């Protein structure tokens, strides 16, 4: 079958924060050419890197590492200007007392882990030890660990449980340090799929933008759907979505560029990625 006549595989992060963009696609409000594939950020990163998806939301660091494989979708991101609520360091000690102590870091995300390491290196000036974990440690085991980095729905659950003495929102900390928004995820197109798609890629792009516009204009509907997952109440979901940003304007690109610059300076990224858009 000709690639242009096939459905286009679209990666969807399996967290609540993605719903304002995907609600209209999944409810049939916006017509689209996608087969939607759900996974964690790290799973989608790997699938996108292997060419198993045509378009996906991925960690911004995945774009940083493999920018030659991708084109950014203009105008789309998951970002925060200050508090993000769902990227949180949970700790039983004040930040500077974590020097030399173990921090569990989630295997579900690349960007958040690198942001945490950057903050310790350049902002907090402490050197903890990092251990990757696949599963969030819930309260029964909290006292076994000094601290834990959790993201997405795991972080939202832990915030409600008040399981740790200290909670540090990484979006707020980045903004306090730099005065810039932080871009946690971007949408990218695999460069390999472009040949032969002709106008189909433009249809996909416009569908994503229409879906985002519908979601942001109908956040009450999205919050009602999200609250059925029993992670946050309707009002909490609405508040959560309202303080996130799904834009990728110049201000957000400046924040992304600064993040990449710091990572290169700290030798956490081998080179500064070029910012290249689909159109």
Image (cartoon, helix red, strand yellow):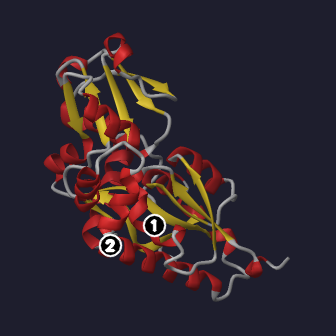
The x and y percentages for residue 259 are: 32, 52
The x and y percentages for residue 172 are: 19, 46
Q: Which residue is mark 2?
A: 218
Q: Which residue is mark 1?
A: 23
Q: Quadrant of residue 127?
A: top left
Q: Residue at x 26, y 58 (%)?
A: 238
Q: Residue at x 16, y 46 (%)?
A: 177
Q: Quadrant of residue 106?
A: top left
Q: Is residue 4 left or right of residue 175?
A: right
Q: Is residue 140 left or right of residue 30?
A: left
The x and y percentages for residue 86 are: 32, 44
Query: How crowded is the residue under tag 1: few (<14 C-alpha within 10 Å), some, or many (20+)?
Result: many
Q: Quadrant of the N terminus?
A: bottom right
Q: Secondary structure at mark 1?
A: helix
Q: Nearer the viewer, residue 126 or 211?
A: 211
Residue 193, visible in the rendered structure: yes
- On screen, 27 above or below 97? below
Query: How crowded is the residue under tag 2: few (<14 C-alpha within 10 Å), some, or many (20+)?
Result: some
Q: Is residue 12 left or right of residue 37?
A: left
Q: Residue at x 40, y 50 (%)?
A: 228
- On screen, 10 above or below 59? below
For this orientation, the residue located farthest to the bottom is 199
Q: Is residue 56 left or right of residue 146?
A: right
Whether residues under marks 1 and 2 lie with C-beta atoms below 8 angstroms apart, the answer is yes
């Amino acid at each position: 079958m000709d690639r242009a006549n096939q459905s286009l595989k679209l990666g969807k992060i399996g967290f609540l924060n993605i719903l304002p963009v995907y609600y209209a696609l999944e409810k049939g409000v916006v017509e689209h050419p996608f087969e939607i594939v759900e996974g964690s950020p790290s799973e989608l990163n790997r699938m996108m890197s292997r060419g198993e998806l045509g378009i996906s939301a991925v960690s911004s660091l995945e774009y940083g590492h493999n920018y030659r494989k991708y084109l950014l979708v203009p105008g789309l991101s998951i970002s925060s200007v200050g508090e993000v609520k769902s990227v949180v360091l949970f700790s039983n000690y004040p930040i500077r007392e974590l020097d030399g102590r173990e921090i569990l870091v989630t295997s579900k995300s690349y960007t958040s882990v690198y942001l945490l390491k950057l903050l310790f290196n350049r902002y907090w000036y402490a050197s903890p030890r990092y251990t990757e974990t696949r599963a969030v440690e819930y309260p029964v085991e909290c006292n076994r660990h000094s601290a834990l980095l959790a993201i997405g729905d795991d972080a939202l659950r832990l915030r409600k449980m008040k399981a740790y003495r200290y909670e540090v929102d990484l979006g707020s900390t980045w903004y306090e340090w730099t005065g810039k928004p932080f871009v946690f995820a971007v949408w990218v197109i695999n460069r390999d799929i472009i040949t032969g798609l002709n106008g189909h890629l433009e249809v996909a792009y416009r569908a994503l933008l229409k879906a985002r516009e519908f979601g942001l204009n109908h956040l009450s509907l999205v919050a009602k759907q999200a609250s059925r997952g029993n992670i946050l109440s309707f009002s909490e979901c609405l508040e959560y979505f309202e303080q996130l940003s799904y834009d990728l304007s110049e201000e957000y690109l400046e924040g992304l560029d600064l993040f990449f610059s710091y990572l290169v300076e700290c030798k956490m990224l081998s080179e500064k990625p070029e910012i290249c858009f689909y159109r």
